Image: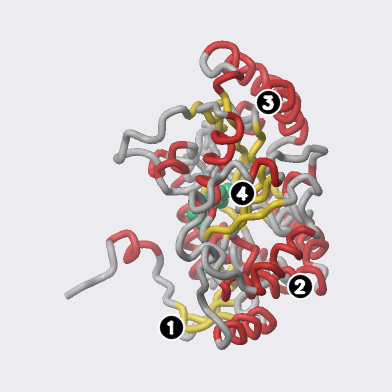
Amino acid sequence: MTSLSPALKQATPVIVDHALGSFIYGADGRRYLDFTTGIGVTSTGHCHPRVVAAAREQTGKIIHAQFTTVLHQPLLQLTEKLGNFLPAELDSVFYANSGSEAVEAAIRLARMATARPNIIAFQGGFHGRTVAAASLTTAGTKFRSGFAPLMSGVHIAPFPYAFRYGWPEEDAVAFALRELDYLLASISSPQDTAAFIIEPALGDGGYLKTPAAFLEGLRERATVHGIMLILDEVQTGVGRTGKFWGHQHSSITPDILITAKGIASGFPISAIAAPTAVMAMAWPGSQGGTYGGNAVSAAAGVATLDVIRDEDLVANARIRGDQLLSGLQRIGAGHQGIGDVRGIGLMLALEFVNRDGDADPQAATAVQQAAIEQDLLLLTCGARGNVLRIIPALNVTEDEVDLGLRSLDAALEDAL
Ligand code: PLP
């Protein structure tokens, strides 16, 4: 008999019947508060009525049309709406299905535009699971071991992870920039370096905000050396951090920006934005794939951006993020084993450490499992798996945040 792969079988005991807003209703009759949002995807909550209506309507018009043959209205509308949010310089947009594909497209573009081979990524970065994207990913060995060789021309530089170093943020930034300069002077010369790629806040790598001063240091070096700065906003984009783009917590503008996840509330679509002159370097047919920019996904994307604007969800992410962060700080102070409590908008995390200050992945997993008993769904992350991340929908309510905090407190009590 055919069965699910072992990874799928072991992943979770919860089987969904249906979902609405911040809640997943299990086939077991239980109602779970979903603070995972399908890894930061269902930005407007599950099955937002306007997203569902847009997708239903589009499904009756045209589901798929390949862009080499015809263009459809949803893609044109999505491009116009995204243009309201993108930096003016990034005036050209291309579409794929997933974050990994967008990362690959950005790497190809940067290499073509600069005629240079190397890409510098940063420790703890997560850029996807395809072979090229995995080559840039150091958010855990599971994403890269066992299928070498990975893509060549990749160098990994330190990320200013102040908590791990036990340093003030300025020192971590100064250290990481010095190491980057050393890398550029010793291993990957600027003449060989096409791009830096970084997330405005590490996602799978541990929900760590990339300090503004670090992004600004990268921008400066990229401009001086003609290196392209690619911002991977697959997880941080579309309001998640309390600003529309994660990089808006700093003063920089990227050369290429990629986004996915929250853009269409759960329908698969990703976008790559760059200046037209850069985008024109890609030969027709060299980017994207059969399904890129799917009509139903694009229609859901248009509805998602409208809901985010009409319901003021970027501001809600900020307000509820602050509520969650102060609740987590209060709870964290009452439990041993929580080394760091952090958050940026609705990307929040608890980092677990043992008595020696070392990563404690067992504690994170135990709390995650105890949370299921409290009808709360959470995810772990971090290169060592010792971070519990909290990613509610952007329209999470005050009461839902309070409920989540109570359930988490009970789970911590049970597990630690
Ligand atoms: N980049 C970032 C920052 C991500 O968080 C992810 C997925 O979690 C990806 C890229 C890869 O996206 P996908 O899983 O859609 O391929």
Is residue 243 rendered to the left or right of residue 407?
right
247 vs 112: above or below: below
Marker disc for residue 336: none
Q: Earlier in the sequence, mark 4 or mark 3?
A: 3
On the image, numbered disc 1 is attached to which residue? 28
Q: Earlier in the sequence, mark 1 or mark 2?
A: 1
- Estimate the x, y position of residue 149 in percent, counting from the top left: 33, 33
In front: mark 4 or mark 3? Answer: 3
Residue closest to the eye, 384 or 42: 42
The amino acid marked with disc number 4 is Leu
On the image, numbered disc 2 is attached to which residue? 306
The amino acid marked with disc number 1 is Asp
Q: Residues within 10 Å of mark 3 (few under 14, many from 20)?
A: some
- Estimate the x, y position of residue 67 in percent, counting from the top left: 55, 65
On the image, numbered disc 4 is attached to which residue? 350
Disc 3 is placed on an element classified as loop
Q: Residues within 10 Å of mark 2 (few under 14, many from 20)?
A: some
The amino acid marked with disc number 2 is Asp
Residue closest to the eye, 347 or 270: 270
Give the spatial CA distance, label 2 vs label 3. 36 Å
248 vs 326: above or below: above
Q: Earlier in the sequence, mark 2 or mark 3?
A: 3
Question: Residue drawn 59% across and 12% down?
Answer: 185
